[in-house]
Structure formats: C-alpha cells, structure tokens
Image (cartoon, coloured by chain):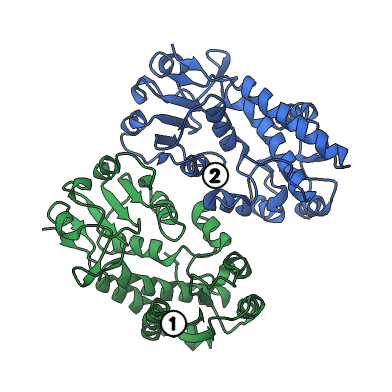
Chain colours: A green, B blue
C-alpha cells in the first residue's frame, strides 16, 4: 500500500503561511485582494469560485467577484480586465475559463498583465516559467504538484521525472518546474509510443492527460511517487476519479495522491499564495521569498 | 560509418527559398532588411556578422550594421533598439551578445519587440516557442537543428528524443520544437544522472552542453541520429570540434552532423529565413508559410 499524499495538509500549511504574510501586509495598509472574473453561471465555475473564496478568506485575502451575464460582449469583458490591471486595490486577477464563444480568449489573455496573472495564463507568465525568470506566475495546478512534492520531502534533483500530458495549464509548465528543480524530465503525450515504458522508468510521475482512469498498473513500478491531476466524475462508480486507476497504482508505487483530496485540494492554496506574492511585489516590498 | 548530415546543403536549400520570397517582397517595394547591432569588435562577433551578411546577401536581404564602441552607455544602446523597433525599413534585429558589463542585457532583451526578434532572445519569442503560438521566432540554432532533421527526412513524430543541455538559446527551445513535432522529449543537463543511459535510449539526440568532446561512444547506439551544436577550438588537435567525440560517435550511430559544417552552417540561413518571415508579416502579407 502506497503512502497517500493528501492535499489537505499541504493546503493548510500553505494557507497558514499566507495568513501570516497577509497580516503583515494589512498592518501596512495593504489588503491583499483577488478579483475573480466570471462569465455566466456554469457549475464548475461556481464551484471553483466558492472554493477559492473560502481559501482566500482563510488566507486573509479579500475577494472581489466580477460577474457578467453569459452574453456579455467582448469589449465590455476586455475593458473590465484593463480596469482591474490599473486598479491598485487589486493584486491578483483570475479569469474563469473557458469563455463563451463571443468572447476572444486570446485577447483576454493578452489584456491581462502578468504581474496580476495569479493563475499563469498569459504569455508573460508562461515565458517566466520557461525562462525561470520569476516574472508572472506558474499555473496553479502545475505549482500545486510541486508543493505536494516539497511538503512530502520528495527530492527532484538528479531524479528521473515523467510528465504525461503537454497542456499549457499543466504538462508543459510542470515539466519546466521539475527541470528547474534539477530533475531530468521527459514529457509524454498522445503521440508517445510505449508510454508505459517511459513512465515506468521515472522516479516521479505526474499525470495530467484528461482521460479518466486510463493509466493502470502497467505504467508503474515500486519506488515511484505519482501525482495525478485528473479529476472526473465516474458515473458508473458514482464517485470522482483521476487519470490513474488508483486501486491498481497504489498496490505498486511508493506514494500517490488520492483523487479527490490530492492536487485539487492544493490548487486554491497556491492561488492564495500567488495573490500574496503579487500583493507583496506590487506594494513594493517583498516580506518573504516566493517559493 | 554514419551518414554525414552536412549543413551546407540545408543552408543552400533554405537560402534559395528565401531569395525567391525576397524577390516577391522587393517586387512589392519591400526590401527585407536585417539590422545587426554590435558593440565593440570582438572576433567572434565580427566573424558571425560577416557570415550573416554574406548569407543575407545571397538571400536577397539588406543588412544594416549598427556598430557601437565597446564603452557605449546603456541609454544610447537601448535607444538604438527602440529606434529600430519603430523603423519600418527594418524587419529583423540581431543583437550580438554577450554585451559588455556596463550594458543591461536583460533591459536590451525587454526593449526589443518580438516581431523583429529574429534570433529568439526575447520573452515574447520564448513564450511563442513554449506555447507554440507562432509569435516571435525561435532561437536560430534551435531552429537550425529542426531544419537539419527536416532536410534529411528524420521523422520526429512518436520518436524518443533527448536534448543534452537546457540553455535558452538551444536546449530548452529545441526540446519544445521537438515536442511540437510530436517527439517524446527528455531534457538532460548538468544534474542528470546516468546521462549515457538517457541518450542511448533516444532515437534522436541533440547535444548542446558547451563542453568540448565530452560525449563519447558510451552515449550512443546504432540507429540514432545525432545533432551536435557544440563548436570549440581544440588547441591540441589544431581544429574545430563539437561537444561530441565525433570519431567515436560516427562508428556507432546512423547519422551525425559534422563539426564544423553541421548545425553551424545552417544557423545564418535560418536567420535569413526569419528576416524574410518578419518582412512578410510586417508588410502585412504572408506569401508563404513560416515552417
């Protein structure tokens, strides 16, 4: 039976540190503030927003909800982003995506300034991740995987790591973050041949391919640490499942994140951390290192 | 004996296509123009500039040399970049690096607009490479490796590729370019353990670690294609050498670039191609696809 890398403990630790830093900011008259920009009322947006609000409250962060009707026009939406960029009372901006078809998602990402891009969706943030320049912020899910590794003392340096999935919200940035921690990283994707073999060779395996329970025990060996960022509703089993077949993997590997309760539980605390980072940077004084 | 992947043929093919596109641009009154910004007179800059000028001439590209004394001040240097950004008669800007210590290299990169950044040194270009968005340009050396693979018909899709080196001028962007071509890519670096094993597993091996003749036959196996971007003066042998011990590798692998005459011979033709791309984009009409 593998060690369970539960996200709740990690999230609590991150949130507590955020709350301390938030208090210092507030003592200087800075109320760290996240603007969440939502269009329409789809369930997953509402659910994520509720989770983020709750976490931010615990972390001493104010949340400003900016809500548009599902049929908002593009110029109104982009203007709101530009206003938030300029607003000194807002330190982080989260654009809930995907957007309805009348809105230009690419233009929205371009409109957002990287300094407030706390979920790493702009070219500036992604350049920062690629170059390791410290500009902008990595996507929260990719950073959450690193926080889990750190919290549970999983050393990356000199280790073989494999990332399954090459999306810009997870796979590619996570690969860069692992490489910056001196892991030797392989990125696998839909065109990878013998992915079983590639994942089995790695010491650290990150999975984010968006296919429910598609990675079974043939991808794993003893000694591995597995982080699963997938989250899917399994109608047959009537429960949430990851990309990994957890029941199979946990009999083989050394440590694995559960789904739910793994990476997903950490993501909003990383979001909160990024808001605090942004507030410190934007208020001109870094009270603590970022990572 | 391995097949020799000579750069000259690749460069000629790229240059000929550039010349055709340059002619079309000139017929529309657009003279594709590269500005080369040089500070001081060090040998490697002068040599690279001469090579680039010659190649550009063959490709129908005008070159404007902007030369500063070695002690130029930072503001003068940055102003020159900003002027070139605004100059409609200039389509590509090459900043010869590294810069002397009184100049702020980071600020120079920030000043340059990605649309004219034909050697991929800006955050905008690197974000373009990471995101595969088509913005800016990849670094010429990384792209030159891809041109070699293409010219010699080396398929990347589904193949294992290993990149030794993680610099921003080669390793990291080359890894992304290989991944966008659907290879399964592993990035190795100074902290990689058992690099021999990692390179030996790959079908395509790109080496750019900056250490003369440090990669010998124990890193290779039959069936591999090897691209060596290293170039060093071997004082003992009185000749140019790569990062790979060529004499050993060529007895093992299927195909390999020579040094000199491999990637180095292709780089300036890629630079020329990027200037033509930039001229087409900036003059508002793409006469041909970019890659």
**Which residue is drawn at the image coordinates 44% and 15% (left, top)?**
B250
Picture quadrant of residue A282: bottom right
On the rendered image, what quadrant is the N terminus of chain A found in? Answer: bottom left
User: Disc 1 to disc 2, how far (Cα)?
Assistant: 35 Å
Q: How many marks?
A: 2
Query: Which residue matches tag 2?
Result: B168
Q: Is residue A93 visible?
A: yes
| Percent x, y of residue A135 | 55, 62
Asked if residue B159 is positioned above or below residue B100 in the image, the reply reads above
| Percent x, y of residue A62 | 47, 86
The residue carrying pointer 2 sits among few (fewer than 14), some (14 to 19) or many (20 or more) residues within 10 Å by Cα, namely some
**Which residue is drawn at the image coordinates 63% and 69% (left, top)?**
A111
Query: Which residue matches tag 1?
Result: A22
Asked if residue A21 is positioned above or below residue A250 in the image, the reply reads below
**Which residue is drawn at the image coordinates 29% and 51% (left, top)?**
A205
Q: Looking at the picture, tell me which residue is in the foreground, A113 or B36.
A: A113
Discs 1, 2 touching: Cβ within 8 Å: no
The chain ID associated with circle 2 is B
Left or right of B123 on screen, residue A202: left
**Which residue is drawn at the image coordinates 67% and 46% (left, top)?**
B101
- Element under disc 2: loop
Q: Is residue B92 visible?
A: no
On the rendered image, what quadrant is the C terminus of chain A found in? Answer: bottom left
| Percent x, y of residue A167 | 44, 56
| Percent x, y of residue B82 | 78, 54
């Amino acid at each position: 039976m593998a060690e369970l890398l539960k996200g709740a403990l990690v999230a609590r630790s991150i949130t507590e540190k955020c709350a301390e830093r938030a208090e210092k900011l507030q003592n200087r008259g800075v109320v760290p503030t996240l603007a969440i920009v939502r269009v329409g009322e789809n369930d997953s947006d509402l659910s994520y927003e509720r989770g983020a609000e709750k976490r931010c409250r615990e972390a001493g962060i104010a949340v400003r909800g900016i809500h548009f009707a599902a049929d908002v026009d593009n110029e109104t939406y982009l203007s709101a982003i530009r206003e938030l960029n300029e607003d000194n009372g807002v330190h982080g901006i989260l654009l809930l995506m995907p957007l309805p078809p009348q809105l230009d998602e690419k233009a929205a990402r371009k409109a957002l300034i990287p300094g407030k891009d706390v979920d790493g969706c702009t070219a500036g943030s992604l350049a920062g991740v690629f170059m390791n320049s410290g500009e902008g912020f990595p996507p929260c899910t990719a950073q959450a995987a690193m926080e889990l590794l750190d919290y549970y003392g999983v050393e990356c340096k000199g280790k073989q790591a494999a990332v399954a999935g090459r999306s810009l919200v997870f796979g590619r940035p996570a690969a860069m973050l692992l490489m910056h921690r001196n892991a030797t990283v392989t990125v696998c994707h839909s065109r990878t041949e013998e992915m079983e073999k590639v994942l089995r060779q790695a010491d650290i395996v990150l999975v984010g391919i968006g296919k429910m329970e598609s990675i079974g025990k043939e991808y794993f060996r003893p000694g591995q640490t597995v982080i699963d960022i997938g989250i899917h509703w399994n109608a047959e089993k009537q429960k949430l499942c990851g990309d990994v077949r957890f029941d199979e993997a946990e009999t083989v590997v050394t440590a694995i994140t559960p789904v739910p309760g793994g990476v997903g539980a950490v993501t909003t605390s990383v979001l909160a951390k990024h808001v605090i980072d942004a507030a410190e940077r934007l208020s001109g004084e870094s009270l603590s290192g970022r990572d």
